[in-house]
Image: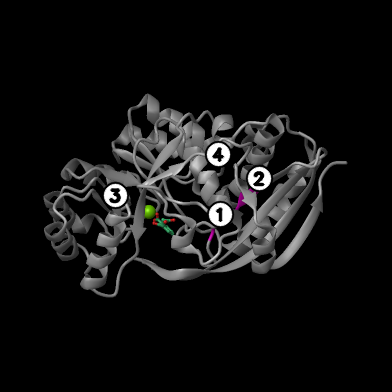
Amino acid sequence: MPIQKIVLHKLKMRLNKPFSTSFGTINDKEFFIIEAIDDEGNHGFGESVAFTTPWYTEETTETCFHILQNFLIPLLRENKITHPNDISQLFSVIKRNNMAKAAIEGAIWDLHAKRQGISLAQALGGKREWIDVGVAIGIQPTMKDLLHTIERHMEAGFKRIKLKIKPGQDIEVLREVRQAFPYVPIMADANSAYTLKDIALLKELDAFDLMMVEQPLAHDDIVDHATLQRKINTPICLDESIHSFDDVRHAIALGSCKIINIKTGRVGGLTEAVRIHDLCRDNEIPVWCGGMLEAGVGRVQNIALAALAQFTLPADMAGSAHYWEKDIIFPEVVVEDGRVKVPDRPGIGYEIDRNALEQFTVQKMEFHIHS
Ligand SMILES: O=C(O)CCC(=O)c1ccccc1C(=O)O
Ligand SMILES: [Mg+2]
Protein backbone atom coordinates (compact mmCIF):
# COMPACT_ATOMS: atom_id res chain seq x y z
CA MET A 1 0.00 0.00 0.00
CA PRO A 2 1.70 3.20 -1.17
CA ILE A 3 1.02 5.52 1.79
CA GLN A 4 2.57 8.90 1.00
CA LYS A 5 1.63 11.01 3.96
CA ILE A 6 0.11 10.83 7.45
CA VAL A 7 -1.53 13.97 8.86
CA LEU A 8 -2.31 14.20 12.57
CA HIS A 9 -5.12 16.62 13.35
CA LYS A 10 -5.40 17.28 17.09
CA LEU A 11 -8.94 18.32 17.96
CA LYS A 12 -10.67 19.62 21.04
CA MET A 13 -14.45 19.26 21.28
CA ARG A 14 -16.89 19.90 24.11
CA LEU A 15 -19.58 17.28 24.80
CA ASN A 16 -23.19 18.52 24.72
CA LYS A 17 -23.53 17.27 28.27
CA PRO A 18 -20.97 15.94 30.75
CA PHE A 19 -20.76 12.12 30.99
CA SER A 20 -20.37 10.71 34.54
CA THR A 21 -19.13 7.24 35.44
CA SER A 22 -17.86 5.53 38.60
CA PHE A 23 -14.41 7.01 37.89
CA GLY A 24 -15.34 10.61 37.15
CA THR A 25 -16.92 13.08 34.75
CA ILE A 26 -15.91 13.86 31.16
CA ASN A 27 -16.70 17.32 29.73
CA ASP A 28 -14.35 17.63 26.78
CA LYS A 29 -12.62 15.37 24.35
CA GLU A 30 -9.14 15.98 23.04
CA PHE A 31 -8.09 13.47 20.42
CA PHE A 32 -6.43 12.90 17.07
CA ILE A 33 -7.95 12.45 13.66
CA ILE A 34 -5.38 10.50 11.66
CA GLU A 35 -5.45 11.05 7.91
CA ALA A 36 -3.56 8.63 5.64
CA ILE A 37 -3.06 9.72 2.03
CA ASP A 38 -1.98 7.44 -0.85
CA ASP A 39 -0.43 8.04 -4.29
CA GLU A 40 -3.84 8.23 -6.00
CA GLY A 41 -5.22 10.98 -3.77
CA ASN A 42 -7.35 8.71 -1.56
CA HIS A 43 -7.74 9.83 2.06
CA GLY A 44 -8.33 7.37 4.91
CA PHE A 45 -9.40 8.48 8.39
CA GLY A 46 -9.00 7.09 11.90
CA GLU A 47 -9.64 8.52 15.37
CA SER A 48 -7.80 8.08 18.68
CA VAL A 49 -10.21 7.29 21.53
CA ALA A 50 -8.02 7.89 24.61
CA PHE A 51 -9.07 10.59 27.05
CA THR A 52 -6.85 13.30 28.59
CA THR A 53 -6.74 11.36 31.90
CA PRO A 54 -5.74 7.67 32.18
CA TRP A 55 -8.72 6.42 34.20
CA TYR A 56 -10.18 4.03 31.64
CA THR A 57 -6.88 2.51 30.50
CA GLU A 58 -3.35 3.85 30.98
CA GLU A 59 -3.38 5.69 27.64
CA THR A 60 -4.02 9.41 27.22
CA THR A 61 -4.22 11.83 24.31
CA GLU A 62 -0.59 12.74 24.95
CA THR A 63 0.71 9.16 25.15
CA CYS A 64 -1.05 8.48 21.84
CA PHE A 65 0.83 11.39 20.30
CA HIS A 66 4.16 10.25 21.74
CA ILE A 67 3.71 6.69 20.46
CA LEU A 68 2.39 7.75 17.05
CA GLN A 69 5.10 10.29 16.38
CA ASN A 70 8.11 8.43 17.76
CA PHE A 71 7.31 4.77 17.07
CA LEU A 72 4.32 3.91 14.90
CA ILE A 73 4.78 6.46 12.13
CA PRO A 74 8.52 5.60 11.85
CA LEU A 75 7.60 1.88 11.63
CA LEU A 76 5.30 2.67 8.71
CA ARG A 77 8.03 4.73 7.08
CA GLU A 78 10.70 2.02 7.46
CA ASN A 79 8.52 -0.87 6.29
CA LYS A 80 6.11 -1.72 3.51
CA ILE A 81 2.70 -3.21 4.13
CA THR A 82 0.57 -4.88 1.49
CA HIS A 83 -2.67 -5.12 3.50
CA PRO A 84 -3.99 -3.49 6.73
CA ASN A 85 -3.89 -6.97 8.29
CA ASP A 86 -0.07 -6.65 8.26
CA ILE A 87 -0.09 -3.67 10.63
CA SER A 88 -0.78 -5.44 13.93
CA GLN A 89 2.24 -7.69 13.27
CA LEU A 90 4.40 -4.67 12.34
CA PHE A 91 3.32 -2.81 15.48
CA SER A 92 3.78 -5.82 17.78
CA VAL A 93 7.35 -4.71 18.57
CA ILE A 94 5.73 -1.86 20.51
CA LYS A 95 4.07 -3.14 23.67
CA ARG A 96 0.41 -2.23 24.33
CA ASN A 97 -0.48 1.41 23.52
CA ASN A 98 -3.48 -0.09 21.77
CA MET A 99 -5.41 3.15 21.27
CA ALA A 100 -2.48 4.75 19.44
CA LYS A 101 -2.14 1.65 17.25
CA ALA A 102 -5.86 1.42 16.53
CA ALA A 103 -6.10 5.07 15.53
CA ILE A 104 -3.55 4.80 12.72
CA GLU A 105 -4.59 1.28 11.71
CA GLY A 106 -8.18 2.55 11.35
CA ALA A 107 -7.04 5.27 8.93
CA ILE A 108 -5.21 2.67 6.84
CA TRP A 109 -8.21 0.31 6.85
CA ASP A 110 -10.37 3.15 5.52
CA LEU A 111 -7.72 3.95 2.90
CA HIS A 112 -7.55 0.28 1.88
CA ALA A 113 -11.34 0.01 1.49
CA LYS A 114 -11.44 3.22 -0.57
CA ARG A 115 -8.65 1.91 -2.85
CA GLN A 116 -10.69 -1.28 -3.35
CA GLY A 117 -13.88 0.72 -3.93
CA ILE A 118 -15.72 -1.21 -1.20
CA SER A 119 -17.24 -0.18 2.13
CA LEU A 120 -15.17 -0.60 5.29
CA ALA A 121 -17.87 -2.96 6.62
CA GLN A 122 -17.45 -5.13 3.52
CA ALA A 123 -13.65 -5.01 3.79
CA LEU A 124 -13.96 -6.35 7.36
CA GLY A 125 -16.44 -9.06 6.35
CA GLY A 126 -19.61 -7.39 7.67
CA LYS A 127 -22.91 -8.09 5.94
CA ARG A 128 -25.51 -6.27 8.07
CA GLU A 129 -27.33 -3.36 6.44
CA TRP A 130 -28.45 -1.91 9.76
CA ILE A 131 -27.04 -2.17 13.28
CA ASP A 132 -29.07 -2.03 16.49
CA VAL A 133 -28.03 0.61 19.01
CA GLY A 134 -28.57 1.24 22.71
CA VAL A 135 -27.80 4.36 24.67
CA ALA A 136 -25.33 4.68 27.56
CA ILE A 137 -26.65 7.03 30.22
CA GLY A 138 -24.15 8.55 32.62
CA ILE A 139 -24.78 8.80 36.36
CA GLN A 140 -27.53 11.43 36.77
CA PRO A 141 -27.81 14.10 39.50
CA THR A 142 -31.24 12.87 40.68
CA MET A 143 -33.55 9.88 40.31
CA LYS A 144 -36.04 12.12 38.55
CA ASP A 145 -33.43 13.07 35.92
CA LEU A 146 -32.58 9.42 35.40
CA LEU A 147 -36.18 8.24 34.94
CA HIS A 148 -36.89 11.12 32.59
CA THR A 149 -33.74 10.42 30.53
CA ILE A 150 -34.62 6.73 30.23
CA GLU A 151 -38.14 7.57 29.10
CA ARG A 152 -36.89 10.00 26.47
CA HIS A 153 -34.49 7.46 24.99
CA MET A 154 -37.04 4.62 25.00
CA GLU A 155 -39.43 6.90 23.11
CA ALA A 156 -36.66 7.58 20.60
CA GLY A 157 -36.51 3.82 19.95
CA PHE A 158 -33.17 2.78 21.48
CA LYS A 159 -32.98 -1.01 21.77
CA ARG A 160 -31.64 -1.00 25.30
CA ILE A 161 -30.58 1.31 28.09
CA LYS A 162 -27.19 1.11 29.79
CA LEU A 163 -26.94 2.64 33.24
CA LYS A 164 -23.72 3.46 35.00
CA ILE A 165 -23.60 2.20 38.58
CA LYS A 166 -21.18 2.71 41.46
CA PRO A 167 -21.16 1.81 45.18
CA GLY A 168 -23.96 3.77 46.83
CA GLN A 169 -25.79 4.27 43.52
CA ASP A 170 -26.62 0.72 42.47
CA ILE A 171 -29.28 -1.59 43.92
CA GLU A 172 -31.78 1.07 44.97
CA VAL A 173 -31.36 2.93 41.68
CA LEU A 174 -31.97 -0.25 39.68
CA ARG A 175 -34.94 -1.17 41.87
CA GLU A 176 -36.63 2.15 41.15
CA VAL A 177 -35.80 1.98 37.46
CA ARG A 178 -37.22 -1.56 37.23
CA GLN A 179 -40.37 -0.50 39.02
CA ALA A 180 -40.88 2.40 36.61
CA PHE A 181 -39.94 0.38 33.49
CA PRO A 182 -40.72 -3.33 34.08
CA TYR A 183 -40.01 -4.45 30.49
CA VAL A 184 -37.24 -2.18 29.23
CA PRO A 185 -34.01 -4.03 28.26
CA ILE A 186 -31.52 -2.71 30.81
CA MET A 187 -27.87 -3.36 31.55
CA ALA A 188 -25.54 -1.87 34.16
CA ASP A 189 -21.91 -0.81 33.72
CA ALA A 190 -19.80 -0.58 36.89
CA ASN A 191 -16.47 0.41 35.28
CA SER A 192 -14.54 -1.76 37.79
CA ALA A 193 -16.02 -0.17 40.92
CA TYR A 194 -16.49 -3.40 42.96
CA THR A 195 -14.44 -6.24 44.43
CA LEU A 196 -15.19 -9.83 45.45
CA LYS A 197 -16.09 -8.46 48.91
CA ASP A 198 -19.25 -7.15 47.22
CA ILE A 199 -20.51 -10.57 46.10
CA ALA A 200 -23.67 -10.32 48.21
CA LEU A 201 -24.52 -6.95 46.74
CA LEU A 202 -23.75 -8.07 43.18
CA LYS A 203 -25.95 -11.14 43.73
CA GLU A 204 -28.86 -8.74 44.33
CA LEU A 205 -28.56 -7.65 40.70
CA ASP A 206 -30.16 -10.98 39.74
CA ALA A 207 -33.53 -9.62 40.88
CA PHE A 208 -33.66 -7.02 38.10
CA ASP A 209 -33.51 -9.17 34.98
CA LEU A 210 -30.55 -7.27 33.53
CA MET A 211 -29.22 -8.17 30.09
CA MET A 212 -25.75 -8.10 31.67
CA VAL A 213 -23.50 -6.38 34.18
CA GLU A 214 -20.45 -4.83 32.54
CA GLN A 215 -17.00 -4.90 34.17
CA PRO A 216 -18.05 -5.17 37.84
CA LEU A 217 -14.53 -6.00 39.12
CA ALA A 218 -11.00 -4.69 38.59
CA HIS A 219 -9.93 -3.31 35.21
CA ASP A 220 -7.14 -5.89 34.90
CA ASP A 221 -8.94 -8.91 36.34
CA ILE A 222 -10.05 -12.10 34.64
CA VAL A 223 -9.80 -14.56 37.56
CA ASP A 224 -12.12 -12.91 40.13
CA HIS A 225 -14.72 -12.34 37.43
CA ALA A 226 -14.83 -16.13 36.92
CA THR A 227 -15.49 -16.60 40.64
CA LEU A 228 -18.22 -13.96 40.51
CA GLN A 229 -19.82 -15.39 37.35
CA ARG A 230 -20.19 -18.75 39.12
CA LYS A 231 -22.08 -17.02 41.97
CA ILE A 232 -24.48 -14.76 40.04
CA ASN A 233 -27.02 -15.42 37.28
CA THR A 234 -26.69 -12.03 35.60
CA PRO A 235 -24.35 -12.47 32.62
CA ILE A 236 -21.04 -10.67 33.09
CA CYS A 237 -19.71 -8.66 30.15
CA LEU A 238 -16.02 -7.75 30.15
CA ASP A 239 -14.91 -4.32 28.91
CA GLU A 240 -11.73 -2.93 30.56
CA SER A 241 -10.16 -6.39 31.06
CA ILE A 242 -10.03 -7.21 27.34
CA HIS A 243 -7.02 -5.93 25.36
CA SER A 244 -6.36 -8.77 22.95
CA PHE A 245 -7.43 -12.05 21.37
CA ASP A 246 -5.53 -13.91 24.10
CA ASP A 247 -7.38 -12.02 26.87
CA VAL A 248 -10.65 -13.23 25.34
CA ARG A 249 -9.29 -16.77 24.97
CA HIS A 250 -8.34 -16.75 28.67
CA ALA A 251 -11.70 -15.27 29.73
CA ILE A 252 -13.57 -17.96 27.81
CA ALA A 253 -11.36 -20.73 29.23
CA LEU A 254 -11.92 -19.52 32.80
CA GLY A 255 -15.62 -18.72 32.42
CA SER A 256 -15.03 -15.08 33.40
CA CYS A 257 -17.90 -13.70 31.32
CA LYS A 258 -20.73 -14.65 28.99
CA ILE A 259 -20.55 -11.56 26.77
CA ILE A 260 -17.71 -9.42 25.38
CA ASN A 261 -17.72 -5.68 24.67
CA ILE A 262 -15.34 -5.06 21.74
CA LYS A 263 -13.77 -1.62 21.46
CA THR A 264 -11.33 -1.25 18.58
CA GLY A 265 -9.17 1.23 20.49
CA ARG A 266 -8.82 -0.99 23.53
CA VAL A 267 -7.78 -4.07 21.50
CA GLY A 268 -5.30 -2.29 19.21
CA GLY A 269 -7.23 -2.07 15.98
CA LEU A 270 -9.81 -3.50 13.61
CA THR A 271 -7.71 -6.53 12.66
CA GLU A 272 -7.58 -7.68 16.30
CA ALA A 273 -11.26 -6.76 16.78
CA VAL A 274 -12.21 -9.06 13.89
CA ARG A 275 -10.05 -11.89 15.31
CA ILE A 276 -11.82 -11.50 18.66
CA HIS A 277 -15.17 -11.44 16.88
CA ASP A 278 -14.35 -14.72 15.12
CA LEU A 279 -13.17 -16.37 18.35
CA CYS A 280 -16.38 -15.33 20.12
CA ARG A 281 -18.48 -16.59 17.19
CA ASP A 282 -16.74 -19.98 17.36
CA ASN A 283 -17.42 -20.13 21.12
CA GLU A 284 -20.99 -18.82 20.90
CA ILE A 285 -20.18 -15.73 22.96
CA PRO A 286 -22.36 -12.77 21.90
CA VAL A 287 -20.45 -9.51 21.35
CA TRP A 288 -21.38 -5.87 21.01
CA CYS A 289 -19.52 -2.75 19.99
CA GLY A 290 -18.62 -0.42 22.86
CA GLY A 291 -18.30 3.35 22.61
CA MET A 292 -15.74 5.91 23.79
CA LEU A 293 -17.76 9.10 23.26
CA GLU A 294 -16.26 9.26 19.80
CA ALA A 295 -16.50 12.03 17.26
CA GLY A 296 -17.79 11.15 13.79
CA VAL A 297 -14.80 9.24 12.45
CA GLY A 298 -14.56 6.89 15.42
CA ARG A 299 -18.31 6.39 15.40
CA VAL A 300 -18.54 5.41 11.74
CA GLN A 301 -15.59 3.06 12.17
CA ASN A 302 -17.66 1.43 14.94
CA ILE A 303 -20.66 1.15 12.62
CA ALA A 304 -18.55 -0.74 10.07
CA LEU A 305 -17.26 -3.17 12.72
CA ALA A 306 -20.72 -3.76 14.20
CA ALA A 307 -21.89 -4.94 10.75
CA LEU A 308 -20.16 -8.29 11.45
CA ALA A 309 -22.46 -11.21 12.21
CA GLN A 310 -21.56 -11.99 15.85
CA PHE A 311 -22.41 -8.41 16.93
CA THR A 312 -25.82 -9.71 17.98
CA LEU A 313 -26.35 -7.24 20.86
CA PRO A 314 -26.99 -3.48 20.44
CA ALA A 315 -23.92 -1.23 20.20
CA ASP A 316 -23.27 1.62 22.67
CA MET A 317 -24.07 4.34 20.20
CA ALA A 318 -26.32 7.32 19.81
CA GLY A 319 -26.50 9.77 16.91
CA SER A 320 -23.96 12.56 16.41
CA ALA A 321 -26.34 15.15 17.91
CA HIS A 322 -26.50 13.21 21.20
CA TYR A 323 -22.81 13.92 21.80
CA TRP A 324 -21.95 17.05 19.79
CA GLU A 325 -23.45 20.35 18.82
CA LYS A 326 -21.62 19.89 15.51
CA ASP A 327 -19.89 16.69 14.35
CA ILE A 328 -16.91 16.49 11.97
CA ILE A 329 -18.56 14.27 9.35
CA PHE A 330 -21.19 14.81 6.70
CA PRO A 331 -23.92 13.71 6.93
CA GLU A 332 -24.04 13.27 10.71
CA VAL A 333 -24.89 9.83 12.16
CA VAL A 334 -28.61 9.49 12.83
CA VAL A 335 -30.45 6.81 14.77
CA GLU A 336 -33.72 5.70 13.18
CA ASP A 337 -35.96 3.61 15.39
CA GLY A 338 -33.01 2.30 17.41
CA ARG A 339 -30.99 1.44 14.33
CA VAL A 340 -28.18 2.98 12.28
CA LYS A 341 -27.75 2.31 8.56
CA VAL A 342 -24.42 0.76 7.54
CA PRO A 343 -23.16 2.88 4.63
CA ASP A 344 -22.36 1.08 1.36
CA ARG A 345 -20.19 3.82 -0.16
CA PRO A 346 -16.41 3.18 -0.23
CA GLY A 347 -14.48 3.21 3.06
CA ILE A 348 -16.13 4.71 6.14
CA GLY A 349 -18.84 5.95 3.79
CA TYR A 350 -19.11 9.45 5.26
CA GLU A 351 -17.39 12.68 4.16
CA ILE A 352 -15.15 14.66 6.48
CA ASP A 353 -16.63 18.11 7.11
CA ARG A 354 -13.40 20.04 6.52
CA ASN A 355 -14.82 23.26 7.96
CA ALA A 356 -15.82 21.54 11.20
CA LEU A 357 -12.46 19.73 11.31
CA GLU A 358 -10.64 23.08 11.04
CA GLN A 359 -12.92 24.68 13.59
CA PHE A 360 -11.99 22.12 16.27
CA THR A 361 -8.31 21.70 15.32
CA VAL A 362 -5.79 22.94 17.87
CA GLN A 363 -2.70 21.49 16.15
CA LYS A 364 -1.89 19.88 12.81
CA MET A 365 1.26 17.89 11.88
CA GLU A 366 2.29 16.20 8.65
CA PHE A 367 4.58 13.20 8.27
CA HIS A 368 6.02 12.03 5.00
CA ILE A 369 5.94 8.23 4.63
CA HIS A 370 6.84 6.93 1.13
CA SER A 371 7.28 8.75 -2.18
O1 LIG B 1 -19.80 6.16 23.62
C1 LIG B 1 -20.77 5.85 24.35
O2 LIG B 1 -21.91 6.29 24.17
C2 LIG B 1 -20.56 4.86 25.49
C3 LIG B 1 -19.90 5.49 26.64
C4 LIG B 1 -19.37 4.58 27.73
O3 LIG B 1 -20.09 3.82 28.32
C5 LIG B 1 -17.99 4.80 28.10
C6 LIG B 1 -17.48 6.06 27.85
C7 LIG B 1 -16.19 6.39 28.20
C8 LIG B 1 -15.39 5.44 28.79
C9 LIG B 1 -15.87 4.16 29.04
C10 LIG B 1 -17.17 3.82 28.68
C11 LIG B 1 -17.58 2.41 28.95
O4 LIG B 1 -18.17 1.72 28.09
O5 LIG B 1 -17.27 1.90 30.00
MG1 LIG C 1 -17.86 -0.13 29.98
Q: Residue at x 57, y 68 (%)?
A: 13
Q: Which residue is drawn at 59% across and 34% down?
A: 119
Residue 325 is marked as none
Q: Which amino acid does label 4 sit on?
A: Leu
Pair 2/3: label in front: 3
Which residue in the protein does label 2 denote? 107
Which residue in the protein does label 3 denote? 160
Q: Does the magenta stretch include residue 88?
A: no
Q: Residue at x 63, y 36 (%)?
A: 346
Pair 1/2: label in front: 1
Pair 4/2: label in front: 2
Mark 4 to mark 1 CA distance (whole Å): 17 Å
Which residue in the protein does label 4 denote? 270
- Whichever of callouts 3 and 1 sits on the residue coming sooner in the sequence is 3
Crowding at mark 2 (Cα within 10 Å: few <14, some 14-19, many 20+): many
Mark 1 to mark 2 CA distance (whole Å): 13 Å
